[in-house]
Image (spheres, rainbow, N blue to C red):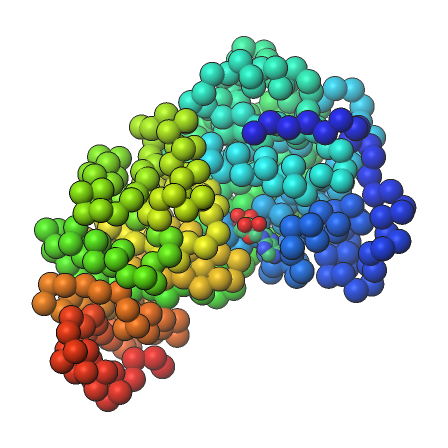
Amino acid sequence: MTSYASSSARAIAAPEASAHLQPSENPFALLGLAPHLVRAVADEGYTQPTPIQSATIPHVLAGRDVLGCAQTGTGKTAAFVLPLLQRLAAAPRAGKHIRLLVLTPTRELAAQIDERVAAYGRHLGVTHTVIFGGVNQHRQEIALARHPDVLVATPGRLLDLMDQRLVRLDGVTQLVLDEADRMLDMGFIRDVRAICAAVPKKRQTLLFSATMPAEVAGLANAMLVDPARVSVTPKQTAATTVSQSVMHVSRDEKRRALVSVLSSPDVVRAIVFTRTKRGANRVTEQLARAGVEAAAIHGNKSQNARERALGDFKSGRARVLVATDVASRGIDVDGVSHVINYELPETPESYVHRIGRTGRAGAEGSAISFCDHEERPLLAQIERLLARRLPVASLAGGDVAMAAPVRALAVDAPAPARERPAPEVPGIARDATSRRRFQARKKARSYVS
Ligand code: AMP
């Protein structure tokens, strides 16, 4: 997790690197990125900046504060890591200080950002480390004693280490608050304020949030100076490549519906969301009994167990990951074909985060939400946030099969709730007769505007 490059952070953009890159043609170079970073991005296989990257990178390179509205999956990590590393590497290092601090709410997200710092900074020689709670702090102490340039941290553990005087932030010149709305949800906001108070006022600050509730806007006001505002609207985010649908099922039907959905060959890799940790365990056990290999990830699991579950999911050993909202934050696994909301989330913003686990970086994905009677108000909240009704997939005879019909629910044309009722998609045919009936009705009615 922790890695150190041997050379100093001062080594940036050696002239020879530009010889084989053609800045005039490379879209990342056109944004102002130096050859070493352009090379790192090419190593990652990126050919075009994402919208949040195009919007953010020039402002950060110009030294401005940034208030960014973007969710995970839009390429936002590179949007802040690339230009900050460039500025960091260009500035002479005065003493042994942490210079870039990234605060993020979960361990998974912290580990992933640190891994991105390693990847994007691989030709710069920038040193970095990551700290988070839930593990013994000893190795983190050793890593901090080496005075890395970049520290990625979750607020709780960082504050602990600050209290123990094991970390100093008085050399920080760049501060990033990532997923600020989530920090708020998770009760970290006081920790965040305390940490920010320990960082010099003269600094560049970036704040990213998927949503902008009043408290986050207040935090931004207090922390940012004349920020450039960048946002990727929902239309441009990964989420728009996700086909969304809702299935009205009773609580008792959910288990069978889930097994049936997961048995489709279309479901290459799925994340199933539950509201509670107990729910996640229960669903995982039920799936195991039904012969579906699933790994569970939630806050009660030890860090090792979480990493093992994520590892099994990433490697394909487990096709299904059952997760709670908090634990899922920052899960960055490519190729998630389906997100299944076994239970709807309490807050509609979490729905947006959940479905952002699929359809990442422009790939297609499907999100299917099970909604029982009691969850109707939660569904209404989600539809209000999306300003559209979700297409409905219905149970045919209590049996659910994921096939073309639900894929055909890829209705991304916004339909204002009051103007157009949600299309009833009788889906999910069980036998040849009902399939034929479905096709005939599908022909007769156009679901997609
Ligand atoms: P993020 O929103 O930072 O979590 O990034 C989501 C995913 O998009 C990660 O797997 C990145 O590696 C990937 N990514 C970031 N920028 C680009 C890009 N310009 N082109 C292709 N993939 C990208």
Residue 213, position in %: x, y?
42, 47
Query: What quarter of the picture does the C terminus occupy?
Result: bottom left
Residue in the image at 30% along x and 48% along y: 272
- 209 to 6, vertically: above or below: below
| Quadrant of residue 49 within the rendered picture | bottom right
**Does any portion of residue 345 appear in the rendered image?**
no
- 184 to 42, vertically: above or below: above
Residue 265, position in %: x, y?
32, 61
Residue in the image at 80% along x and 49% along y: 35
- 307 to 43, vertically: above or below: above
Taking depth in this image into account, of 345 and 314 the one nearest to the observer is 314
| Quadrant of residue 441 within the rendered picture | bottom left
Residue in the image at 65% along x and 56% along y: 46
Residue in the image at 83% along x and 35% along y: 11
User: Relative to 81, is 388 on the left or the right?
Assistant: left
User: Relative to 161, is 428 on the left or the right?
Assistant: left
Report how many numbered discs are placed on residues in the image.
Answer: 0
